[in-house]
Image (cartoon, rainbow, N blue to C red):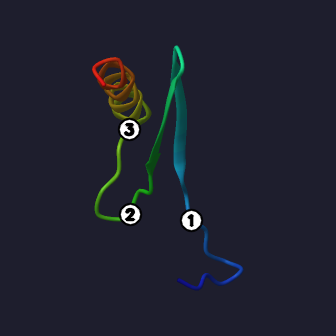
């Protein structure tokens, strides 16, 4: 993908550590689909919960 100087690209990234386990959640919103900060936080919390189940 090529961006011009007037364009930008957003990445939402969360790094999670639970004990010795780590996870990364990356979300790239588009014009058609985005998450609110609260929704992204809920997603990250869910990932943190799931990592304890491995």
> Do tag 2 and tag 3 residues touch (Cβ < 8 Å)?
no
Residue that appears at 38% across and 63% down: 30
How many numbered circles are shown?
Answer: 3
Q: Considering only vertical position in the picture, is 51 above or below 27?
A: above
Q: Give the CA distance from mark 2 to mark 3.
A: 12 Å
Measured as percent of width and height from the top left, residue 42 is found at 34, 25
Q: Earlier in the sequence, mark 2 or mark 1?
A: 1
Q: Earlier in the sequence, mark 1 or mark 3?
A: 1
Report the residue marked by disc 1.
9
Question: In which quarter of the view is residue 4 placed?
Answer: bottom right
Measured as percent of width and height from the top left, residue 8 is found at 61, 68
Report the residue marked by disc 2.
30
Residue that appears at 44% across and 33% down: 37
Residue that appears at 54% across and 43% down: 13
Q: Considering only vertical position in the picture, is 7 above or below 44?
A: below
- Residue 52: mark in rendering: none
Residue 53 vs residue 16, the one in the foreground: 53
Mark 2, Cα crowd under 10 Å, few <14 / some 14-19 / many 20+, is few
Mark 3, Cα crowd under 10 Å, few <14 / some 14-19 / many 20+, is few
Judging from the image, what secondary structure is the residue with disc 1 in? loop
Quadrant in which the C terminus appears:
top left
Residue 20 vs residue 15, the one in the foreground: 20
- Residue 36: mark in rendering: 3
């Amino acid at each position: 993908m090529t961006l011009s100087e007037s364009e930008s690209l957003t990445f939402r990234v969360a790094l999670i550590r639970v004990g010795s386990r780590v996870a990364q959640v990356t979300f790239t919103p588009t014009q058609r689909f985005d998450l609110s900060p609260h929704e992204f936080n809920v997603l990250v919390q869910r990932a943190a919960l799931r990592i304890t189940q491995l």
